[in-house]
Amino acid sequence: MDAARIQAEQVQLAAREPEGVTYPEVDAGGVPGIRCEPVDADTDHVLLHSHAGGSVPASAPVDRKLGGHIAKAAGAPELVLGFRRTLEHKYPAQVNDAEAAFNWLLSEGYEPGNIITFGHSIGGFIAVALALRLRDTKLPLPGAIVSISPWCERHLRRRADPRRTRPRPDPAGDESWRSARHSADV
């Protein structure tokens, strides 16, 4: 897994660095994060960005430049969240971290309606899961959710491929696949 994480970290090297964006590292309620701060940004609004990568290999540094480009285009700062990754921390640790960061943004003076949860792939799931959790616990909701190609089906239920000899692992941390029998219902 270390090799996959190193390879994922190298991906961001190919991306162009956006001009006029700084990247201070922050502790967002106990969760590490990278603030992407464009020059002349509207500081009344903020994007809470959950990175992609199946919550296994990728990390906040992988999405730092992407966050910078999005923040610059949106004209608002963006917090790229360094949520706990799955192999070491099982679900729902990732959503817990997003909630801690959301609460931190509130403590920093942001109005809930001025916080936009954002993510792609597993990050898109986290953006939606956070809003659902806040709704279900009757807490203030973000002003918007941007969920790009979210990974929302954690159990990946589909017909079995008869050519497969063993179940496919679930990188989101559900280890029930270890004892699953290969059948048409898998």
Image (cartoon, helix red, strand yellow):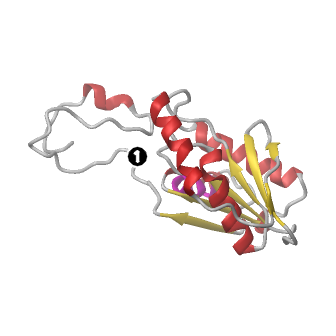
**Visible residue check, residue 47:** yes
Horizontal arrangement in the rendering, residue 61 relative to residue 44 (left or right): left
- Up the image or down, 70 lies above or below 93; here it is below
Magenta span of residues: 123-131
SS assignment at label 1: loop
Q: Which residue is mark 1?
A: 154
Q: Does the segment drawn in magenta span residue 8?
A: no
Horizontal arrangement in the rendering, residue 150 relative to residue 111 (left or right): left
Whole-percent x and y of residue 25?
Answer: 80, 44
Task: Give the residue type that dot 1 points to.
Answer: Arg
Q: Residue at 84%, 64% (x, y): give it.
A: 111
* Magenta span: chief secondary structure: helix
Q: Residue at 87%, 67% (x, y): give it.
A: 43
- Up the image or down, 38 lies above or below 169; here it is below
User: In this view, which residue lies farthest toward the left?
Assistant: 162
Given residues 50 and 41, the one toward you in this image is 41
- Up the image or down, 56 lies above or below 22; here it is above
Q: Residue at 58%, 51% (x, y): give it.
A: 12
Given residues 73 and 86, the one toward you in this image is 73
Quadrant placement of the N terminus: top left
Whole-percent x and y of residue 78?
Answer: 74, 60
Q: Does the segment drawn in magenta span residue 126?
A: yes
